Image: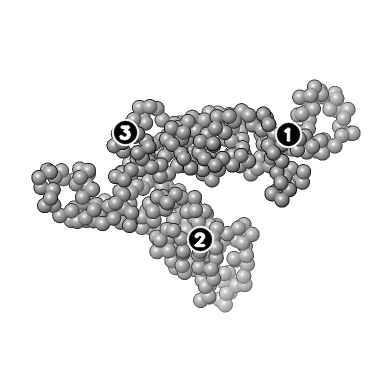
Amino acid sequence: MEVYLSRNHQTCLHLFPLSVGRFQDVFDQPNGPDGQPPHFVISRFVSPVEALDRNLKDVVIRDLSGLSQLNALVEAVERMSGRDLQIFSGALDLEPISSPTDALRVSQQMERYERIDGAATEEKLGRWLVERERSDIRFPEEVRPYLDYAAIGSRYHDCHGGAFTPEGYVRRREVVPALEKDSVIYLTLATTEQSDTLLLPASEEQMEEAKEALEIDDFSQAVIAGVNYYDKASCLDHLIPTDRITVEDANALALCLQEMKEEDGGLMKFCAVLEVEQPGTFAEALNIAMDRDDYELVPEDLVKYAEQNLRLAGAGDEILNMLEDYTDFDGLGKAIAKEDGVRQTEFGLVRRLSEPFPAEKQEQSPQLGGL
């Protein structure tokens, strides 16, 4: 994503998101002629979200914290689906935006907004309101051909707020869905007419209620426009693909995640396995979740891993004490870890029990202390 930052009347293009090393480089410049530390002005924002340029142009970035928020905003936008990008653009025009922090906050609260597809003008919004009987007045069928739909749409817009986009009318939800205590996933479901949010795991009765709200007979008639996980599982956003996702599979995964919340290190292990296995579809990620007992996290301290394996082989405290002065436990731990196919991930060391992970190519990453 292209962000043009200006300082002292000079504009420079920066490609976001920035790497960690680039943060300091941007601000590692001498003070300006006024003796003040360097600060930048966003002069242009080139992204799939047109409203970002409109709302953030001329905003001042004064320090690394502001730059970090801008970077986080870009990362959030890059994770959005096409539909979410369009809704986000409309949502930005609904809220007071004076900094990247404000825009980032909106991106983290997408469940608060919905889009009426196709209602891109006041006239089309008016027709949707009348046909769906969502306006303040119920109009009999016989008078509808004579209605001023643009006036109806304009009145609704003035009273309720909202933003017109090329794809439809974005508005704040009347009831904002909240993740309940036992909910771990919420899905945004959409048809050409409307959208709804389904909290998971859901009972059969709740699934039927969602179908009724969307006026469909089967979930295949709706599009899954958004998938969000509870706070501690937000790492799953970039680990689980949404290719070929179904409501039924998402509900099954939600049940697994609910169980993981009760398991010691269950979510961390799942994330580590996903990083190694790299599932190509949502169904593959679900299979991993259901088969998670075939994996285990390995102690980061490979000395402890060596001792753990010696104990499993029958060695007690007496034997371990005898070996202490004569054994390179760290080297032994590395050797065992290599043989077991242990892999280093962002979430810790992990191995597969049924069959070791294949060894990584040397050029991919120096793992486990160079093994």
Tell me what residue is drawn at x 64 percent, y 44 percent.
Answer: 346
Q: Is residue 16 visible?
A: yes
Q: Nearer the viewer, mark 1 or mark 3?
A: 3
Tell me what residue is drawn at x 47 percent, y 58 percent.
Answer: 100
Pick whichever of labels 1 and 3 is earlier in the sequence: 3
Q: Secondary structure at mark 3?
A: loop
Q: CA distance from mark 1 to mark 3?
A: 49 Å
Tell me what residue is drawn at x 29 percent, y 45 percent.
Answer: 193
Outermost residue, right side: 326
Residue 140 placed where, x, y %? Answer: 12, 43
For label 1, count other residues whose C-alpha is less than 10 Å away and answer few (under 14), some (14-19) or many (20+).
some
Q: Secondary structure at mark 2?
A: loop
Q: CA distance from mark 3 to mark 2?
A: 40 Å
Q: Nearer the viewer, mark 3 or mark 2?
A: 3
Q: Which residue is mark 2?
A: 1
Out of 368 and 223, give the one closest to the viewer: 223
Residue type marked 1: Asp
Residue type marked 2: Met
Q: Which residue is mark 1?
A: 340
Question: Can you say whether 318 is above or below 80 in the image?
Answer: above
Q: Which residue is mark 3?
A: 217
For label 2, count other residues whose C-alpha is less than 10 Å away and answer few (under 14), some (14-19) or many (20+).
some
Residue 180 placed where, x, y %? Answer: 42, 34
For label 3, count other residues whose C-alpha is less than 10 Å away and answer few (under 14), some (14-19) or many (20+).
few
Tell me what residue is drawn at x 58 percent, y 69 percent.
Answer: 37
